[in-house]
Image (cartoon, rainbow, N blue to C red):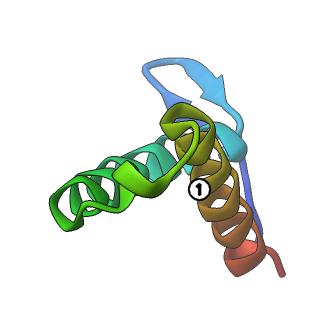
Amino acid sequence: MKLYEINLFGVYVAPIAVLMVLAWAVLIGLRRLAVRAGVLRYVWHPALFALAIYVIVLSFLVLATSP
């Protein structure tokens, strides 16, 4: 799959920006799931944990869409 810039109302948006928004949406769902399951109680720094999960999800999306 070839990644091209996306024309959004006359502004060209890089494909990584779209992937970042998608990873953020996935992170929201995973974070809600973690709160319900009580996982965040056992994490030393919840914000740092959320950042690490975001980077993992974003990396997975980049690798999944790369040719």
Left or right: 1 in relation to 6: right
Q: Position of residue 43 (x, y in %)?
A: 51, 51
- Three-letter residue code for mark 1: Ile
Q: Is residue 1 visible?
A: no
Q: Is residue 57 visible?
A: yes
Residue drawn 84% across the image and 81% down it: 67
Q: Position of residue 57 (x, y in %)?
A: 60, 62
Q: Secondary structure at mark 1?
A: helix
Where 57 sits versus 67, above or below?
above
Comparing 49 with 22, the one in front is 49
Residue drawn 68% across the image and 79% down it: 64
Q: Position of residue 65 (x, y in %)?
A: 69, 74
Where 31 sits versus 21, above or below?
below
Comparing 43 with 23, the one in front is 43
Q: Which residue is outermost to the top?
A: 10
Q: Which residue is outermost to the right?
A: 67
Provide the residue designation for mark 1.
Answer: 53
Residue drawn 59% across the image and 56% down it: 53
